[in-house]
Amino acid sequence: MHKEQEDGEVVTHVTDTEARSGSRTRVTRNILVISLVLVIAVLAITMGFGFFETGESGADQVNGNMTQQGAG
């Protein structure tokens, strides 16, 4: 890190490594990928249980009642 005088102001310059606060590692990327896969799996499982356990929703019953009332 070094400071320079530019246009009457003191400007601080840092290197790429200093700006990153360390060296490059794959840990962060691995954590993000694993977390994304886990979130997608949990969402798929949750939606799967919802689709398989629900034969009909309340909206189906309401639509059926409205059709019967309209026909009668």
Image (tube, rainbow, N blue to C red):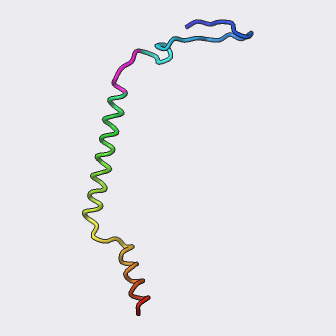
Q: Is residue 26 shown in magenta?
A: yes
**Residue 10 pos. (x, y %):** 68, 10
- Where's the C terminus, which quadrant? bottom left
Above or below residue 45? Residue 50 is below
Q: Is residue 43 shown in magenta?
A: no
Q: Give the residue furthest to the front.
A: 71
- Name the residue at 71% across, 11% down: 9
- Name the residue at 32% across, 50% down: 43
- Name the residue at 28% across, 62% down: 51
**Residue 5 pos. (x, y %):** 69, 6
Q: Give the residue furthest to the left.
A: 52
Q: How many marks?
A: 0
Q: What stretch is highlighted in magenta?
A: 23-28
- Name the residue at 69% across, 9% down: 6
When asked about the image quadrant of residue 62, the answer is bottom left
Above or below residue 3? Residue 70 is below
Apparent side of residue 12 relative to residue 61 in the rendered image (left or right): right
**Residue 71 pos. (x, y %):** 41, 90
Apparent side of residue 35 relative to residue 4 in the rendered image (left or right): left
- Where's the N terminus, which quadrant? top right
Above or below residue 53? Residue 26 is above
Q: Give the residue furthest to the right.
A: 8
Above or below residue 23? Residue 60 is below
Comparing 70 with 39, the one in front is: 70
Secondary structure mostly seen in the magenta stretch = loop
**Residue 26 pos. (x, y %):** 34, 23
Q: Give the residue furthest to the bottom.
A: 72
